[in-house]
Image: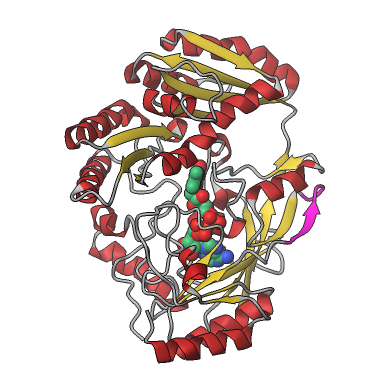
Amino acid sequence: MQPSGNRVHLETTLRNCVSRGRVLTSPAQLAGYDTDGLGYKEYRPDAVVIPADTDELIRVLQSARQLGVPLCFRGAGTSLSGGPVAAQGGIIVHTSALRAIRKISPEGFWCEVECGVTLNQLDEALKQHSVFYPPDPSSGPVCTIGGNVATNAGGAHCFRYGVTSNYVLGLEVILLDGSVHRFGGPAGGRGRWREDWKRFMIGSEGTLGAFTRFWLRVLPRPEKVWTFRATFPDLITAEKAIHGLVADASYPVAIELMDPRCVAMVENSPMAVGLPVDSFMLLTEIEGPAALVDARVESVAEILRNAGSRDVVYSDEAILRGKLWKARKVAGGLMGQLSADFVVQDAVIPKRALAELLQLVYDEADAAGIRAVNVFHAGDGNLHPNFLFDSRKPGELEKVELIGKRLMQRVVEVGGTLSGEHGIGNDKAAYMPLVFGPDTTRLQLAIPAVFNPRHQLNPLKVFTERRFTP
Ligand SMILES: Cc1cc2nc3c(=O)[nH]c(=O)nc-3n(C[C@H](O)[C@H](O)[C@H](O)COP(=O)(O)OP(=O)(O)OC[C@H]3O[C@@H](n4cnc5c(N)ncnc54)[C@H](O)[C@@H]3O)c2cc1C
């Protein structure tokens, strides 16, 4: 927090940068920005600014630089890693007003969007042109393309299609000095906008600059989709099905797993869709030309049965398919509603270690008396153990942190890594030395040294060393 004299100066300066009503400073207004999806870690910003356009955003950045105040960008604030929070106080720049879809080129298979466009908003617009943008985080109704690019977001269908970085042809970024740079464009790294520095930008978690515009690759919408759900009595049979699906020539587009605790949680909520409880539930999908996928349906069902499923259901009908996906997609939000606090880890592991690591999660959590619920992108080996707890109860947070540390150590031992899609933020920054030694850390820190040398943008994120000193 800034001293009160400085806060008045900060507020006056910001009000001169943007149009009326776009600077928030009252405690009630700021409270909504204290946390991201991890509600238990709170940091109060000194001010929130909602620029109406890029000119206003440029003025805010330049002023923050002159004032020597930390600054953090925020899309929808759905991050699950402590990304869009003011860890050292200062300014939060909320990008919600920059939400125009500027162009869709169905014949060129690209679109141009502003950073505050939400994923579902983009999907609705693309539908009319029979194309789609594949990355699909479950937070799609609210999360923004800016947040997706900054975290290199994934999602259920990224098993087949790949994550956000595979779809960013170009981006516009504004640095702290207000200079505007464009890396790539509709023609990717070719043509007029040759530099492929966008690769440095994607996944940089708001530590290098403000992304304002993107050129994204889109694909033709698949003609036909079949969705399957299969229940399994235990982890071993569920893992066998995952291996079977990954190796199959029908090449599913998504392979998701919900554990019995997660299924029960959905079924005991107003979001219930009638799933059988007490089993692991695997959700998978194939899509493509109708004749091709229709011919593959039975063989996919057979893989699921051969692995040990007692109950395989599949459909190409929109309402039933929608219900199955609803169960999967609401699960994350429900944890936040049902528990005082929750932490979700985002480890990636080789798929051969799935059953072992999940068992470790249950054993550690049960021994500590903490509720653990699993729902994750199984095809990618992207585990999402959710630990439900109450940070007001003495010792609970410490127990969860200890479980997280032990889990991450084992993840690294089996050849995995810390994040598949949520990013590092400040929640996982302490684990970075488990994966990166001093030499690699030095190289990685050389990148912010070029763009944001004093760590004024999103300090204390990704690396604990990134502290801003005015
Ligand atoms: C219920 C639920 C389900 C989720 N499911 C998934 C999932 O399946 N896959 C997945 O990958 N994630 C998932 N997430 C996590 C989260 O939704 C993603 O990380 C998403 O990309 C964040 O987008 P956002 O707009 O909310 O960004 P924010 O949370 O606001 O910010 C995220 C990071 O991006 C930076 N940032 C935001 N906008 C900009 C910008 N314009 N310029 C520079 N930096 C910027 C912020 O500083 C921060 O570091 C889920 C979250 C929830 C709550």
Residue 71 lies, with reference to residue 441, above or below; the image says: below
Q: Would you say residue 251 is visible in this rendering?
A: no
Taking depth in this image into account, of 24 and 177 the one nearest to the observer is 24
Residue 135 in percent (x, y) is at: 59, 44
Say above or below: 155 vs 319: below
- Closest to the observer: 360 or 168? 360
Q: Is residue 277 above or below residue 78?
A: above
Q: Name the quarter where the N terminus is drawn.
A: bottom left
Residue 203 in the figure: left or right of residue 322: left
Q: Could you say which quadrant of the image residue 265 lies in?
A: top left
When the figure is inspected, residue 12 is found, relative to residue 86, above or below; the finding is: below
Is 401 displayed left or right of 298 in the figure?
left
Residue pictured at 63% horizontal, 76% vertical: 22
Query: Where residue 124 sits: x, y (%)?
Result: 74, 44
Q: State left or right for residue 195 relative to residue 366.
A: right
- Kindly tell me whether residue 445 is visible in this rendering: yes
Pick whichever, 34 or 450, lies toward us.
34
On the image, the x and y values in percent for residue 414 come to 26, 37
For the C terminus, the quadrant is bottom left
Look at the image and say whether residue 43 sits in the magenta stretch.
Answer: no
Image position, residue 91 (x, y; %): 48, 76
Q: Residue at x 72, y 59 (%)?
A: 112
Figure colour scheme: secondary structure
In which image quadrant can residue 35 be found?
Answer: bottom left
Question: How many callouts does the rendering have?
Answer: 0
289 with respect to 172 (left or right): right
Magenta region: which residues? 100-108
